[in-house]
Amino acid sequence: MTLSADSPDGAAIQRPEHVDAIFKVLSHRRRRTVLRCLDEDWRDVSELASRVATEEGTACGRSAPTASLLHVQTSLEHQHLPKLAHAGLVRWDRGEGRATLGPAAEELSPLLEFASRYETVRLGGGR
């Protein structure tokens, strides 16, 4: 799935359901956080869960207890990573328990930066 206006046939622009699908996937804050926590290197899902829990806790002014880490990891494996992988935003090796950014993630960088700035202001992290 691509959002590029440079596609040879312009299909991405002419098919608004692709844009709708991307916005639906990105509508959950935890999925946006996952994309900010990943890079081109493969990450172990337990390490990713720790990074996500830390970022979420920092945004709310608290640290994540161990029970919360298990909850975050479970939600990543059963809900968020499958949706992100289906959209092409992450590559997820369920068997190895590893994830990395997918081919479509780079195109969304400006949108994620905008969302991150807005969430920081909204959560009291700055103005």
Image (cartoon, grey):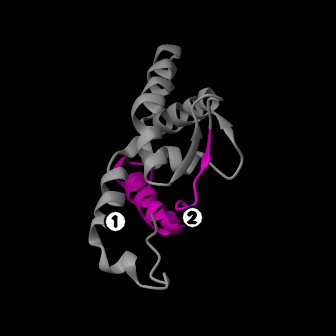
Left or right of 31 on screen, residue 96:
right
Q: Residue at x 45, y 63 (%)?
A: 1
- The spot of residue 86 in percent (x, y) is 44, 48
Dot label at residue 93: none
Amino acid bearing label 2: Glu
Q: Residue lying furthest top in this view? A: 67
67 in relation to 73, above or below: above
Q: Earlier in the sequence, mark 2 or mark 1?
A: 1
- Decide: few, some or many residues near mark 2? Use Cα within 10 Å; few <14, some 14-19, many ≥20: few
- Tag of residue 18: 1
Residues rendered magenta in the picture: 99-127
Indicate the amino acid at tag 1. His
Residue for badge 2: 106
Residue at (41, 44) in percent of width and height: 83
Q: Quadrant of the C terminus?
A: bottom left
Q: Residue furthest front?
A: 9
Residue 33 drawn above or below residue 20: above
